[in-house]
Image: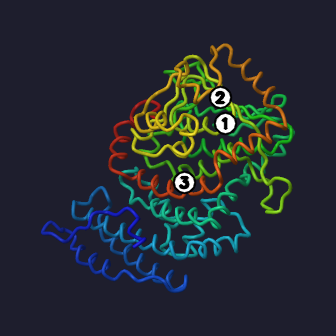
Amino acid sequence: MSEDRTPTAPRTVATDEDTSGLAPRVDRWEAARPPLGRTVREDAEALAQHISEAEDLLAALPPRPERDRTQRQDAARLADGGRRLRDRFLRLHAESVYDTLTDGRTRHPRVDELVYAAAEAFPGLVPTRARIAAELRHIQAHKEGREIDQGIFFRALLRSPKAGAHLVDSMLLPTRRALDLLPGFRRDGRADLGTVLIERRGAAAHVTVNNQSCLNAEDNRLMADLETAVDLALLDDGVRVGVLRGGVMDHPRHRGRRVFSAGINLRHLREGRISFVDFLLGRELGLLNKLAKGVIPDPDPDAFPDRTVQKPWIGVVDSFAIGGGTQILLVLDRVIAAEDAYFSLPAAQEGIVPGTGNLRLGRLTGSRPARRIILGGHRIAATDPDAGFLCDQVVPTAGLDAAVEASVRELDSPAVVANRRMLGLAEEPADAFRAYLAEFSLVQAYRSYSEDVLEKVGRAWARPGASG
């Protein structure tokens, strides 16, 4: 049956080692899984009841780090059974659920608003805000993995051509923070967002990343600040080109040097501070998709002639672009690198998926190099012959500023905007992006709680500036 396609935990039975006495009750709970296939409301009530019973059983267990082997198996059976039921419910009712949450697709909530609205409207379907907040008190290895339920939810929505397309558009709308800051940025040409500084210089918005504590590694705060900066650059009529560059670091290992990006902050991942909704999914649908496809200033579907505002983007790579930093480069129109810079996508070595890197890298490098980079962790120096797939120009560090200014002048053209729009349509059709993100939603959620990932980040987190 279709529901069997959701990854499952091993089936176990009660043993003499059962110290909780819970296994027989879990057996009965599994046997009582309700059949679905009636109205959305009737199925939602059955789901809520069954999940509530699972939560009561789970509450009878000790906290995750204190469980013995059998108790861990009992918890895994409860989690797996609940996930399979949620998956089945959403296969039947995803579009009805989405229409309920968006008033028939007349409202445009972001992913975080949407998932918590679903928790209230459909109890048991996804974790509540309070349950996610409780999870944040634990390191990643000690969480129950409730974000996996959010991954199931978003996979189902994004698989739907109607709900998924609407959700993708919703995430292309400007953030509320950007709209609040826009009048001041238009007036002053400058906004300090905390980890990101955006300055308008002539026709260009220079976006400088200054996440000083971790060599510009990506975390929840940085992703929010970067998306706000991209919104401001796209919405300001005085900006015609965007420039993205890392700031000068005060980190002992790179003091006085610019760094583009050290990738995901592994320390934050280990500590359970990397959000699935806000970071792992939100950066793909928000920040990166806005860089690739622009912002939608007005959700009116009849906007003419184009719904999105797009502008060309230049990336300037000093030192290195690791992981998420390289992912960003894949959606930019021009990449200029220093001679001593390098690129890498080590996500497979860390156990996770490099965002939309798997979708986008191959069309630049070809299939075989993409596999070497993603599956094998092959690092590419800016001066390597293969670097031409990832960057357009390599210059001495002292020549970067002049190269950037020349590129701004070259890309400052309405014809460039029109052609980048058409290139984007040819290279990445909307349905291909949506279908990829649907499967990414669940795969990345599971990967974030997989034993190999937890072991790897546990070893890596103590390194200064740990990232990947």
| Residue 332, label in figure | 1
Contact check, label 1 and label 3, Cβ < 8 Å: no
Asked whether the beta carbons under mark 1 and mark 2 sit within 8 Å of each other, the answer is yes
Residue at x-position 40% and y-position 64%: 6
**Amino acid type at mark 2:** Val
Residue depicted at x 38% and y 60%: 144
Three-letter residue code for mark 1 = Leu
Q: Is residue 71 above or below residue 217?
A: below
Asked which colour scheme the image uses, the reply is rainbow
In the rendering, which numbered label is found on residue 436? 3
Observer-nearest of 419 and 347: 419
Q: Which residue is mark 2?
A: 335
**Residue type for callout 3:** Tyr
Q: Residues within 10 Å of mark 2 (few under 14, many from 20)?
A: many
Q: Residue at x 70, y 70 (%)?
A: 105
Residue 65 occupies quadrant:
bottom left
Disc 2 secondary structure class:
strand
**Residue 114 place in picture, x, y as percent:** 61, 65
Q: Nearer the viewer, residue 259 or 68?
A: 259
- Mark toward the start of the polypeptide (3 vs 2): 2
| Viewer can see residue 468 | no
Q: Which mark is residue 125?
A: none
Pick whichever of labels 1 and 3 is earlier in the sequence.
1
